[in-house]
Image: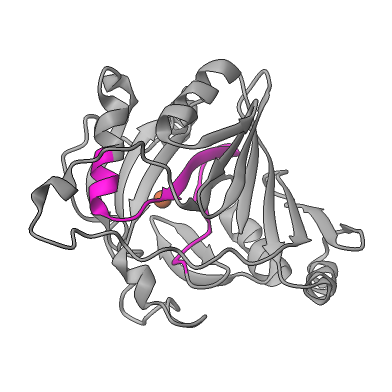
Amino acid sequence: MISLTRRVPDLDATREFYRQFGLQETSPGTFATTVGGEQLFLLAGEIPQVVEIHIGVDAATDLDQVAARLKAFGVAAERAATSLKAVEPVSGVAVRLSVAPRLPKDPPPSAPSSVERTELVRRGPLVPLRLGHVVLGCTDVERAKGFFIEGIGMRLSDYVIGGPFMRFETDHHNIVLLPAPMTLLHHTAWKVRNVDEVGYGGSQMIENHPERHAWGLGRHGASANYFWYLKDPAGAFAEYYYSEMDDLADGPYFWDPVPGTDDLPVAVWASPALEERPLIPEAMRAPLLAANEQ
Ligand SMILES: [Fe+2]
């Protein structure tokens, strides 16, 4: 289980975006999914900021192990009886681990079960199943990767466009670091029940809001996720995703990198993007251009 706390400049508009995205607002700024429970916490702030990533662990003994690993890695951790908190030194993002029950298994994908075609017509609102991954722009991905892999104990699945894709268990990735000239939230990704829901969610979000459209519908190469990315009012992207490959992942080694597959494309297919580099958050564009000119 993973959850995220963010600060955003326009809290009301960002809350409205995530309500329309399908998250359930349980109290102002707190958003829940159907399987994952409360997984997004929005706070007001002058600039967009990632405050904390929260990760559930099985037992206090896991916290002991992480505390020892972090100490060996040279990062101090605050330890309480059922939780542990440490600050990732590159981004300054707090990472909190606490003992929490495992999420139930995702429900099986919903597919039409008969030739009754009206089943395809959506009659209720779309509510994502759970937050699957958080992607951070980071100024030193190798050092930050050490914190998550050597310190927290995550596993490396793949590198894509210079970023380590890391996981806790059977998802292809739960935390990704992308090289960037500053720390920022690149995107959060929310699992839905099938590719129809990716398409349904994306198309209903851009209806009357073409400015929200970033990239989709498409399918990623490494994770095999179908995707559709939308821009939120705080400058990050929100992704609907689904992959039937997740249902094939039967153990912790499923996604370990396969030699010779390090050139997997970001997308194996996708509709043309509206902009040349659709997944560069606006906050990153000027610094990136400046860096490229040096
Ligand atoms: Fe993603």
Residue 288 drawn in magenta:
no
Residue 179 drawn in magenta:
yes
Relative placement, left or right, of 52 versus 268 is right
Q: Is residue 10 visible?
A: no
Which of the 4 image quarters holds residue 224?
bottom left
Relative placement, left or right, of 239 versus 251 is left
> Residue at point 55% right, 66% down?
104
| Residue 142 pos. (x, y %) | 59, 60
Residue bounds of the magenta highlight: 171-200
Which of the 4 image quarters holds residue 45?
top right
Which of the 4 image quarters holds residue 63?
bottom right
Q: Nearer the viewer, residue 141 or 209?
A: 209
| Residue 11 pos. (x, y %) | 60, 19
Q: Nearer the viewer, residue 83 or 231?
A: 83
Relative placement, left or right, of 176 versus 271 is right
Number of marks in the rendered image: 0
> Residue at point 38% right, 55% down?
161
Q: Nearer the viewer, residue 290 or 152?
A: 152
Relative placement, left or right, of 112 versus 223 is left
The colour mode here is: one colour
Q: Is residue 97 visible?
A: yes
> Residue at point 85% right, 68% down?
71
| Residue 7 pos. (x, y %) | 65, 28
> Residue at point 72% right, 62% down?
100
Query: Where's the N terminus, which quadrant?
Result: bottom right
